Image (spheres, grey):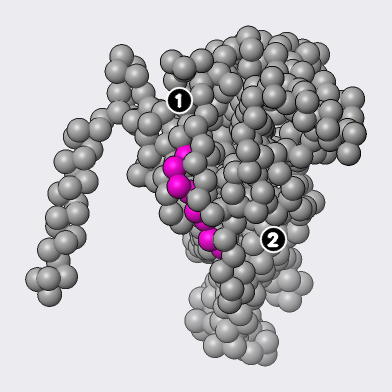
Amino acid sequence: MADQHTIVRVTGVKRNFKLGSTDVQALKGVDLEIFAGEYLSIMGPSGSGKSTLFNMIGGLDKPTEGKVYIDEVDIAQLDAFELAWLRNRKIGYIFQTFNLIQVMTALENITLPMIFAGVHNDAAVAKGIELLDLVGLHKRYNHKPQELSGGQQQRVAIARALANDPAIILADEPTGNLDLSTGEEIIKLMNDLSKERGVTIITATHDYKMLNASDRVVWIEDGLIKKIEHRDQLNIDVGCISMA
Amino acid sequence: MVHGVEPWVEDTFLSTEQDMSKNRIPFQNQDEQPDIAAQVVLPFKKSFEISLKSLKSRFLRNMVTVTSLILAVSFLAYVLVGADISSGLYHSGDLDLIKALEKTGYEPGGSAKERWIVILSLLVCTVGIINAQLMAVTERFREIGTMKCLGALDSFVLRLFLLEASMQGTTGALLGSIFGAIIAILVGMLRFGLDAVTMLPLNEVGMSLFYSIGVGFGLSLLGVLYPAFIAARMRPIEAMRTEE
C-alpha cells in the first residue's frame, strides 16, 4: 500500500463562513491524503464540517486557507474552463437527492456528460446503454426520473457519474434518501464498481452501513479530523457502536 | 493613469504566456490530445433539443409567459395595423371616408395617447417576462447546478435560456402580430365597411407586422437576459443543497 498513488491531497484546509455578523469556522485545518482506487467514507454528525470538506475535494467550494490538490494540481489555480473539464472528466458526482434532470430520460441523463465531453451521439448512446446494463436498468432507458423509484434513480445517477470514466466518484449521502435495503444495494453496487473499475470513491455519510464497504473511514468532528481508521480496525468499532 | 494601466498590460501578457505553455489541461496525460477547444462542448443541435424538451415539459408555465407576450404584441400590431387602415382611408381621397375618419378622432401619424398606452403595455409585458423567467430560474436551480457538476460551462446555461426565450419569443410574437392584425382589420371593417380592406396599403401592413414581430422577439430576449445571467453565474454547489 506504501507505493500507492495519491489522487487527492488536502493540506491545512480551513473554511470560514459568515453567518450574519459572526464568522463560523466550518473546517479548522484538515490534512488528508486519499489514494487512487480506495473507497473512503467521511463520517460525522451534521454540522461537523463533513459536507464542507467534501465540497472542497470536489472542487465545488474553495478553502479560505490551505490547499486541495487533485492529481497534484492545486484546484484553486484552475480557471472556469479547467474546472468544468475537471468536473466533466475527472470527477463523477452522486447526490443525496439523485439530481437527475427531470425533463430527460434515464439514457439522456447518462449521455449528457458525454455530450459535454464531445463524444459523438451514437457512441454516447451505446455507452449509455452499456452503463445502464451495468447498474441493472437496461429496460428502463426510456423512462423519465419521475417514473423510476428512488433506488432506480440513484442507479441512473451512478451510471451517469461513470459516463466519462472518472478517476474519482464523489457521493454525498448517496443512501440518505433511500430505505434500508435499497441503500444496501446501492452501497454494494458502488463497492463492486470501485473494485472492478479501480475508481476512487469518496462518500460523505452518516450511514453506518457504509462502514463495511469502506477501505478507510475518516471521522470528522467539529471541523477537525478526529481519527482515520482502516477497514481492519473498523469491525471492532462497529461492534462497539452497536453495543453502546 | 499610467499606474492604473500597467498591471493590466502585465496581466494580459502573463496570461497569454501561460496559455502558450499550458495548451493542455493540467490533468491530461502527455499523450492525450491537447486541443482544449474541443474538450468541453455543447453542440448547437443538442442545446436546441434540450431547450425544446424543457419548454415542452413546462408547457403550461411557458404558455402563461407566451400569452403575456401574445397580448402585448397583438396590442402593438392592432394599433399599428389600425393606423395603416386609417391612413389608407385618409389617402383614398374619398371625402365621406375622411369625414367618417375624423368623427372617430383620427390624427394622421397616430395620437400621443395611443403611443403611450402601447409603450406601457410593452413595458408591463417585459416586466412580466422577467418575473416569469426569474421564477423559472429559481425552480431550476438544482437542474442548473447539476449540469454544472457534469461539466457545463456558464455559456451552456446562458445559451439554453436564450434559446428557450427566443423560441417563446418567436411563438408569442408571431401569434400576437397575426391576432392583432386580424382584430384591427375586423374592427376597421366594422367601422368603415369593406373600404377598410380595399384601401389597405399592403406593404405598410407587412412592415407593421414585421415591426411587431421584431419588437416581441426583442422583448422576450430582453426579459430573459437578467434571469439567464443569474442562472449562468450560479455555483454548482447549489446542486448539493438537500432542501427543496
Quarter occupied by residue A38? top right
Q: Is residue A1 above or below residue B220?
A: above
x and y percent of residue B48 in the render? Answer: 57, 36
Residue topped by disc 2: B135
Q: Which mark is residue A58?
A: none
Q: Is residue B71 above or below residue B168?
A: below
Q: Chain of mark 1?
A: A
Judging from the image, what secondary structure is the residue with disc 2 in? helix
Which quadrant of the rendered structure holds the C terminus of chain A? top right
The residue at the point 59 percent across, 12 percent down is A197
x and y percent of residue B44 in the render? Answer: 49, 34
Depth check: give the residue in front, A161 or A59.
A59
Q: Chain of mark 2?
A: B
Judging from the image, what secondary structure is the residue with disc 1 in? strand
Q: Is residue B38 above or below residue B158?
A: above
The residue at the point 34 percent across, 19 percent down is B29
x and y percent of residue A108 in the render? Answer: 66, 26
Depth check: give the residue in front, B162 or A105.
A105
Task: Inspect the magenta stretch and tell me whether residue A12 lies in it.
Answer: yes
Furthest-left residue in this view = B2
x and y percent of residue A137 in the render? Answer: 78, 16
Residue topped by disc 1: A6
The residue range painted magenta reads A10-17
The span from disc 1 to disc 2 (Cα, nearest Å) is 44 Å
Task: Inspect the magenta stretch and tell me whether residue A168 lies in it.
Answer: no
**Residue type for callout 1:** Thr
Q: Is residue B48 above or below residue B97?
A: above
The residue at the point 82 percent across, 21 percent down is A185
The residue at the point 49 percent across, 41 percent down is A31
> Which numbered mark, 1 or 2, is in the foreground of this view?
1
Same chain assignment for discs 1 and 2: no
**Residue type for callout 2:** Met
